[in-house]
Amino acid sequence: MQDQALFEYVLRLADDSLILGQRLGEWCGHGPILEEDIALTNISLDLIGQAISLYDLAAELEGAGKNHDQLAYLRFENEYKNVLLVEQPNGDFAMTILRQFFFDAFRLPLYEALMQSPVSQLAAIAAKSVKETRYHLKHTSEWVIRMGDGTDESHERAQAAIDHLWRYTSELFYEDNKDEQLQALEQVPSLKGIQANWMETVKTVLYEATLAIPTNNWKFEGGREGRHSEHMGYILADLQYMQRAYPNMEW
């Protein structure tokens, strides 16, 4: 039971990284400037690298003889446990940056906490990933401030992205009995503390960017339970095509 709970936990982390990495990869060759094209692609590669390490650990915990490619490419839509936020379309540059900012502000304190996990492999993955994630948050925070406190158009686009994406952020802090079981064993942190850290970061950056947090309390959830938006099927069609068309292929 303990390994099953930890498998589910690690799988969620891996799925978040994989799907967001796939989304960011869509910007390759389409960035607004060359430097940002490269930056977004590098962040995408960081996320895919994190996903590989997490899938390797998940495969070991599951004990079913799978590898990271099988977990990434050979599951059905309802078997993925990523949050809805990461599968949302790129939209314009502001939408992409705000989606990434909300995610980075969550992932950094989570990885920092997981570095203290007694699960040595998970702690090692967190320790390696925290360096990358710290850069990701710095990068997106600077862009949020630049857009929010920039021109009228950049401000409006950034605010529109916040207003649209805010409804998906509460799911970042989803917890169920598996989380509670792992928390009781002190293997993973409570997300309540992570949420407080996340909110502090969000408020600080948005205040400097002269942007506002929406006042509505809409919440769109379901991804952690395998219920996804209409966008997920299209992502998987692209992501899984080569492995489905040519089973067991390797680069």
Image (tube, helix red, strand yellow):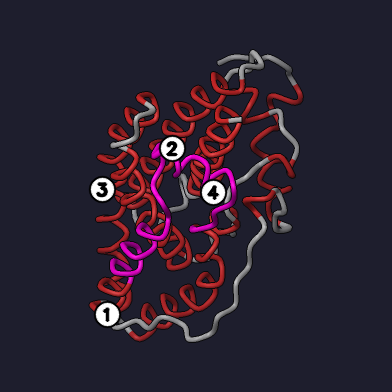
Q: CA distance from mark 1 to mark 2?
A: 38 Å
Q: Amino acid at mark 2?
A: Leu
Q: How many marks?
A: 4
Q: Which residue is mark 4?
A: 23
Give how far apart the Cα atoms at labels 4 and 1 are.
27 Å
Pointer 3 residue: 135
User: Mark 2 or 3 closer to N-term?
Assistant: 3
The amino acid type of the residue labelled 4 equals: Arg
| Residue drawn where x is 47% and y is 52% of the image | 30
How far is mark 2 from mark 3, CA to CA? 31 Å
Classed neighbour count for the residue bearing mark 3: other residues with Cα under 10 Å, few (<14), some (14–19), many (≥20): some
What label does residue 185 carry, if any?
2
Kindly indicate the quadrant of the structure image that contains residue 115. Answer: top left
Label 2 SS = loop
Amino acid found under the numbered disc labelled 1: Tyr
Q: Are the residues flagged by discs 2 and 4 in contact, CB closer than 8 Å?
A: no
Let me know if residue 127 appears in the view. Answer: yes
Q: Residues within 10 Å of mark 2 (few under 14, many from 20)?
A: few
Residue hosting label 1:
207
Q: Residue at x 70, y 58 (%)?
A: 229
Mark 3: secondary structure: helix
